[in-house]
Image (cartoon, helix red, strand yellow):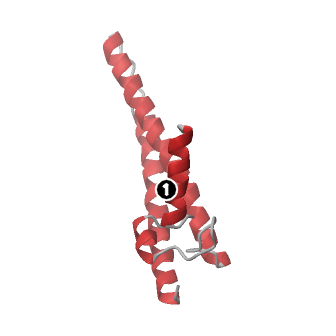
C-alpha cells in the first residue's frame, strides 16, 4: 500500500472516529434532557423501550470506536491492510468497504463458515 492510500485511510478513519464520538456525546445529552416521568404504564414502557434501544446503539458505537482506534494504531505501527490470519495484503476495495477490518476476504469468509457450522 502506498503513502497516498495510507493517508486516505488515515483521514477516513479520523473522520469516522470524530463522527462516532460526536454521536455518542449527542446521545448522552439527549438521554439527560429527556428524563420525563410518565404516569401511564404504556407510555413508561415505550420510553424504557426507546431508552434500551438507544443504549444498544450507543454500545455498538462504543465498539466501533474501539475498532477505529485499533485501525488507526495499525496505521501508526505499519500493519494496517495486512490480514491478521494469513499475513497477506487486504485489498483496497475491502478496506474502502470496511476500513476497520483485520481480515482479508478469504479469511473472513472462512471465519464466517466456521461460525455458521458451530452455530455462533
92 displayed left or right of 1: left
> Which of these two is toward me, 88 or 57?
88
Task: Determine if residue 116 is in view.
Answer: yes
> Which of these two is toward me, 67 or 24?
67
Q: Give the labeled residue for mark 1.
A: 21
Image point 47% across, 83% down: which residue? 5
Eyeballing the image, is 46 above or below 72? above
> Could you say where residue 36 lies in the image, as x and y percent from the top left?
39, 24
Q: Quadrant of residue 82?
A: bottom right
36 displayed left or right of 58: left
Q: Residues within 10 Å of mark 1 (few under 14, many from 20)?
A: some
22 displayed left or right of 120: left
Eyeballing the image, is 71 above or below 63? below
> Could you say where residue 72 lies in the image, as x and y percent from the top left?
58, 70
Task: Determine if residue 100 is in view.
Answer: no
Image point 34% across, 22% down: which residue? 46
Image point 37% across, 17% down: which residue? 44
Eyeballing the image, is 60 above or below 56? below
Q: Residue furthest right?
A: 77
Amino acid at each position: 500500500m502506498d503513502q497516498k492510500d495510507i493517508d486516505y485511510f488515515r483521514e477516513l478513519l479520523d473522520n469516522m472516529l470524530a463522527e462516532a464520538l460526536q454521536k455518542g456525546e449527542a446521545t448522552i445529552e439527549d438521554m439527560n434532557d429527556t428524563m420525563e416521568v410518565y404516569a401511564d404504564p404504556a407510555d413508561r414502557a415505550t420510553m424504557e423501550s426507546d431508552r434500551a434501544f438507544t443504549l444498544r446503539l450507543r454500545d455498538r458505537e462504543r465498539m466501533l470506536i474501539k475498532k477505529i482506534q485499533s485501525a488507526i494504531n495499525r496505521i501508526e505501527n505499519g500493519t494496517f491492510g495486512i490480514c491478521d490470519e494469513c499475513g497477506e495484503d487486504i485489498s483496497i476495495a475491502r478496506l474502502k468497504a470496511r476500513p476497520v477490518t483485520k481480515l482479508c476476504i478469504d479469511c473472513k469468509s472462512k471465519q464466517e463458515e466456521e461460525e455458521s457450522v458451530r452455530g455462533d
